[in-house]
Image: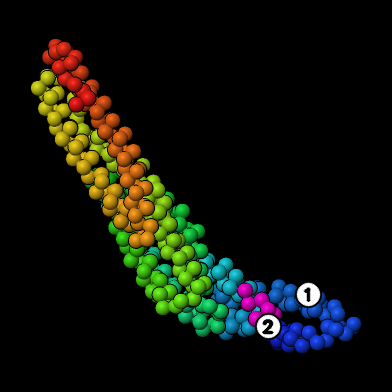
Amino acid sequence: ALLSAAEQIGRTKSGLTALERLPRFRDARAKLATLSEHLLQQLRPKLVAALHERDVVGVRECADAASQLGASALVSEVYLQTRQGPLYEQWNAQPRSEGADLGAFGSWLPQFHAALLEVAKFELSFAMSAGLLHPRTLVTQLLAETLMTIGSQCAGRLLEIARAEPEAQEAPLASILALAREAAQWTEALCEQLGCAKNADGDLREAESALRAACDAPFAAVRAQYASVEAAILGRRLAAMRFVTAGSPAAMAAALAEALTDADAAHELAPERCAAFASTASAEPGAAVARLLRLQLATVLEGSLATAHAQASLVLTKLRAALKLAPETFNSNS
């Protein structure tokens, strides 16, 4: 009935131009607009239900009715609102473990990515079968909007992993790097699944850019926190070093030599971690990201080296006192 009424209104609108010049038809367009709005209000819940039920025929009929009423954009709007729900349900199925079990999320995230590849395949097929306008662009927008919404939550979970107490000092960062590389491969597979590269449509290109940004958003947020992650790694390494300030001079000197060797090794690895982390950015902004991370690294190293220097200076002060040497015997700035 709705489709029939919409078709009738559509035909009436198309033939109204010539009749509007007659006095009795001057307000006809306003009346048709009111009637169209009334039909659209009835159409929306039917479209929502058809989308929830994945009813291809029902969605197609609603889309045809909306087109007759000059409201094709309504279908895209309702589709984007309605089809995000199942994606959020998949996201909310993630493991919520904490502490030592944070690795469960790291194992689950690639599974979520794989599931979204299947979702993209299904949604594209569904949108095409239902006759929705610009189905590739529509599905790409759906995924981009959903992923951007959950991006902050994903970034939060990734930062929990990065800042966790590891068995090996670089283990959390290595885990993040592995997930970032997997996500980069997944992003390419997702864009290929949607046929972005094979279509030159401007709207699709714009939607693809938004999708790529949404896929990278959690890792971009983690990169923005790189300084705090690196500082935590170096801080743990320095805390484990033995700057001995009591005992025999020989023991203090031996411990200091070992601690300085360990400090040197710890700080030498930092630029490698920085470069690896920068490599997770896409090629286009990669150089800018690398520069930004190097600036963060410089600040972190400055603070970490100052801490190591202060601890070593304290040991040297104790050694001078123990050996009853003049203050200038050891130059703590060397």
Which quadrant of the figure has residue 305?
Answer: top left
Which quadrant of the figure has residue 47?
Answer: bottom right
Whether residue 277 sits left or right of residue 47 in the image: it is: left
**Secondary element at image label 1:** helix
Asked if 117 appears above or below 8 in the picture, the reply is above
Residue 183: image location, x then y, percent: 35, 62
Identify the residue shown where x is 53% and y is 66%. Answer: 85
Three-letter amino acid code at the position of disc 2: Gln
Outermost residue, right side:
23
Identify the residue shown where x is 25% and y is 44%. Answer: 270
The residue tagged 1 is 34
Whether residue 78 sits left or right of residue 230 in the image: it is: right
Is residue 272 a member of the stretch shown in magenta? no
Q: Residues within 10 Å of mark 1 (few under 14, many from 20)?
A: few
**Residue toward you, 328 or 105:** 328
* N-term-proximal mark, 1 vs 2: 1
Residue 229: image location, x then y, percent: 34, 44
Q: Which residues are magenta?
A: 67-73
Q: Which mark is residue 68?
A: 2
Q: CA distance from mark 1 to mark 2?
A: 15 Å
Whether residue 183 sits left or right of residue 315 in the image: it is: right
Q: Which mark is residue 3?
A: none
Residue 178: image location, x then y, percent: 29, 58
Q: Quadrant of the N terminus?
A: bottom right
Whether residue 194 is visible: no
Q: Residues within 10 Å of mark 2 (few under 14, many from 20)?
A: many
Which quadrant of the figure has residue 49?
Answer: bottom right
